[in-house]
Image (spheres, rainbow, N blue to C red):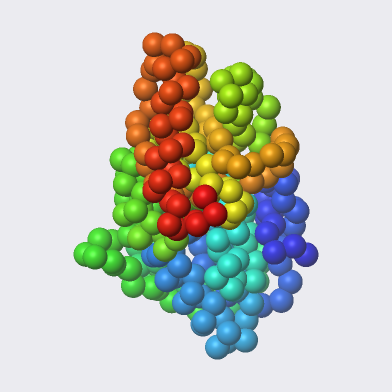
Amino acid sequence: MEKVVSLNLNSKCLKELDCVDELEGDWAITVGVFDGVHLGHRYLIQKLVDNARKRNLKSCVLSFYPHPSKILSPSQQPCELTDPLERAERILSLGVDKVVYINFDREFSKIRAEDFLKDVIYRRLKCKYLLVGYDWRFGYRREGEIELAKEFGQKLGFEVETAEPFYKNGHLISSTYIRRLLHSGRLEEAFEYLGERYYIRRKVVKGSGRGSLLGYPTANLGGTENLCLKEGVYAVMVDDKYLGVANYGYRPTFDGRTKVLEVHLLDFKGNLKSKKVKVEFLSFIREERKFSSKEELIKQIERDIATVQDSFRKVFPRF
């Protein structure tokens, strides 16, 4: 069984993941969306891993996709820090044995709190130890709370423990706060609370070809219309070895209507089409704007490249 799977509920699983009916063995579980896998999440997950080992259990993170807000209140749907595979990659790097996703749809949103504990946590995931955040709520209309979980744990035979909130620099770290920092172009602050530079790993898709016509070919990343990034130009690192200049936004010079991430790699020759690449955001360079001509745009691209090279030559000497 793979380390990242989707739990089969009502014959609905996430695409690209193996669909399973239940886990085998005894498990320590924590539950949450974990978008971004920031320092607060890492604190909780590390505690799960440590306590699982003490109890001779395997560790599992149960997560949901899409974000529950997309189903429950679409107008308040947050931007996306990580897709399911990016999220799982970060979680597994912390020593977790398995990541399980549930396809969060309207039908699942109506599951009663007691049924979630009995059917999902206990019967399907074989939980012997449940670790949750201090403010955890679950089930239909968030009716379930920690005391209910502890009550059912005593009846069914699994331990329930809560983790304290995690603060840094006086801030209670949350995905919402990190989204706000990224939306403001405050990458360095976001990195501090994420515990690493922000990155995504997405597939290169066919673009309009305008970059090549301008003399600066770009790799266009699919599934990037809802990223938590300020629209503008960034210094990036691709696949941990290529310095690049990325533009995120609507491409107003060409009257674009959908946000997209385009990356121009410096000193790169090759074809990335259909490959999945890692794009790590190093710094925010400038805001996106509309240019009066292609010539003006080309001159600005040249300045952006020079800015990135000058800023990161000391960090990455070969540039």
Q: Is residue 202 visible?
A: no
Q: Nearer the viewer, residue 95 or 117?
A: 95
Question: Horizontal placement of 56 versus 225: left or right?
Answer: right
Outermost residue to the top: 292
Q: Nearer the viewer, residue 71 or 235?
A: 235
Outermost residue to the left: 170
Quadrant of the snapshot with the N terminus = bottom right
Q: Give the residue at x 54% y 32%.
A: 262
Q: Is residue 69 above or below residue 294?
A: below
Q: Is residue 70 above or below residue 214?
A: below
Residue 268: x, y in percent?
Answer: 64, 41
Looking at the rendered structure, the number of numbered marks drawn on it comes to 0
Q: Nearer the viewer, residue 281 or 12?
A: 281
Q: Is residue 16 visible?
A: yes
Residue 71: x, y in percent?
Answer: 50, 37
Q: Give the residue at x 46% y 30%.
A: 302
Residue 81: x, y in percent?
Answer: 47, 47
Question: Horizontal placement of 192 versus 88: left or right?
Answer: left
Residue 13: x, y in percent?
Answer: 69, 47
Q: Is residue 275 above or below residue 26?
A: above
State the image quarter where residue 41 is shown. bottom left
State the image quarter where residue 193 is shown. bottom left
Outermost residue to the right: 1
State the image quarter where residue 73 is shown. top left
Q: Give the residue at x 49% y 74%.
A: 46
Q: Nearer the viewer, residue 44 or 25?
A: 44
Q: Give the residue at x 52% y 82%.
A: 50
